[in-house]
Amino acid sequence: MKTRALPALALICALGLAATACSDPTAGSSGDSGADGKQAAVDPTARLDGVKLTMWTAQNTVNAPQQVIDAFEKATGATVETQAIPDLYEQNVPTKLASGDRPDLMFWQPSISTLPFIQPQQNLLTLDGEPWEARLGDTEKSLGMIDGKRYAAIVTSPAMLGVYYNKDVFKQAGLSGKDFPTSYDELLALGHKVVDKSDAAAFYEAGGDKWPLQWQMQVQLTDLDQQWWDGLNKNQEKWTDPVVVGAIKKYKEKLLDAGLAQKNYRTGTFTGQADALWKGEAGMVLNVTSFQSQLQAKYSTAEIDKKIGWFPIADSAATGMDSPDQTNGVVAFKTGDEKRQNAARQFLAFWLGPDYADYIKAMKIPSVQPSVPTPDRLPQTSKAQVAALPTAIGVFQAKAIVAPDTHLYLADMIFDKKNPQQVAQAIQDQFAQVAKAQGAPGF
C-alpha cells in the first residue's frame, strides 16, 4: 500500500472530530474495560449469531481482510460487511467521521502522524492488554500507540523501503550480487555504472503519480537522530534545516539533472515502474512494499526470484527503512453498542489469534508475530525485507507528528515551479500550520 500524507486542509478539518466526539454520548466512556480498568478475556470463537459488523477499507484494499472475515463468520455466526471508502481514503475517512458516520472496524495507518487525525482518545476503543499485543514483534509493538495507550491492532508488518533491481541489468553493467551500496552516495555511483554500461536508465521515477517522489529524499534523512525529530515536533527544529535542503538539492542535481532517471520521469507512474524494471528498461526502483505486492500480483515466486533482487539503503548505511501504511493497522470504534464493541474486539482476537497463520499464508505476507512463522513460499525480495526489518529506520511519517505533502512540493520542483529551498519552506509551512491546528505544544 502507498504511504501518503493527508492534505493539510483535510488534517485541519479532521480536528473537528474532537467536537463531534464531545457531543457524542458514547464518547466519554471506553466501553471496553471492566471496573478495574482491565480488559475482559475474549474468546475468539464465541458464538455471535445475529451480530453484524461493518469495516471500512480503501478501494484498493477491500479484499485484504476477506480471508479472516470468511473464517470469522464461519466460526462465530457473525456477519462482517466491508465498505470501500472512495479515494482519497485518508482524506474521505475523516470527513465521513466528522459527519457522524462511523464503522465498527477500519483499516488505518497506525503512525504518530496519521492515527491522531481520527481522534483516537474520543472515538476508538483502547486495546491495551489484548492477548495478541504481547505476541507482536518489537517493530510492530511500537505502532498504534498514542500517549502510551494502544488504539490499533497491528495485522501486517510496516512496508519496507529499499531498492528493487533487475538482475539482468546489473549483470549487463558488470555488477554482481555483492555490489550493494552502503550509502546514498554509493547508490548514486552505482546508478552511473548502470547508465554507462547497460541500456537501462539507472532509476525509474514516478512523477506522474507523485507519491513515490518522497523516497529519494527520505533515505537521505536517516542520519538525523531522534533528538532532531523530537525538536521538530516541538517547533525547535525546522524542515528548512540545511540537511533537509541538501537532500532535496542532491535528489534534483545528482540524480534527476545528472540523467540517472528515465527520460519521462515527470510523467512516470507507479505501474510503469514495475513494467520498466521487469523489462530491464530501468535498473533500479526505490520504493516500498506495495511495489513488491504489484510484482507478486503478476508474476510467480520463481519468476521474481530469477529476475528481481532487493537491498536496503540509508544515507550512510546499508539499512532499510520501515514505513507504516493503511493496511498495517485495524482500529475499533466506540459505537455505543456494547455488543458490537465486544464483537469487534473478538474479531481482532480471532484475526491475530487462531486465524493468523492462515491469514498470512493466504495473503503471502510476512508475519508480525515471531511465534507464527512467515510463509515459506515468499520471493527472496520479500524475505530480504523481513530480514532487514529489525534494524530498519522509520520514515518521517513514523517520526514527525505531522506528515507533510512532501511529494507534492517535490513534484513542483521537477516541473520547475519550486527550487529546493522553496520546497523545504513549503514543507515547513504546512507542517507548522497543521501542528498549530492540532494544538501541538510549541506551535
Image (tube, rainbow, N blue to C red):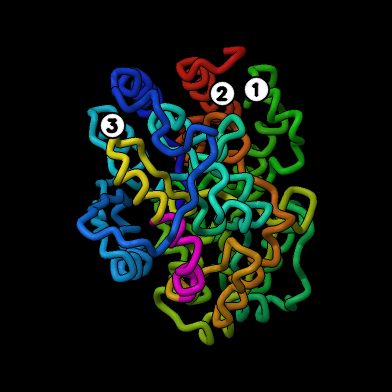
- Dot 1: within a 10 Å radius of its alpha carbon, few (fewer than 14), some, or many (20 or more) residues? many
Q: Secondary structure at mark 2?
A: helix
Q: Residue at x 60, y 56 (%)?
A: 161
Q: Which residue is mark 1?
A: 238
Q: For the magenta stretch, what is the residue range?
A: 347-361
Rendered residue at 79%/50% (across/down): 316
Report crowding for label 2: few under 14, some 14 to 19, many 20 or more residues within 10 A (C-alpha): some
Tell me, yes or no, if residue 212 can be seen here. Answer: no
Name the front one of labels 3 and 2.
3
Q: Along the polypeptide, which appears first: circle 1 or circle 3?
A: 3
Q: Position of residue 148 (x, y in %)?
A: 61, 33
Please say if the residues under marks 1 and 2 sit with CB atoms less than 8 Å apart.
Answer: yes
For image coordinates 67% across by 33% down, the residue present is 244
Up the image or down, 329 lies above or below 226; here it is: below
Nearer the N terminus, badge 3 or badge 2?
3
| Badge 2 amino acid | Gln
Quadrant location of the N terminus?
Answer: bottom left
Q: Amino acid at mark 3?
A: Thr
Q: Which residue is mark 2?
A: 428
Cα distance between the residues tagged 1 and 3: 29 Å
Say whether residue 177 is visible: yes
Identify the mark at residue 95; answer none if there is no mark.
3
Residue 429 screen position, x and y as percent: 52, 20
Residues under labels 1 and 2: Cα distance?
6 Å
**In this rendering, which labeled residue sits more in front, label 1 or label 3?**
3
Residue drawn at x 47%, y 37% as measured from the top left:
33
The one nearer the camera, 193 or 139, is 139
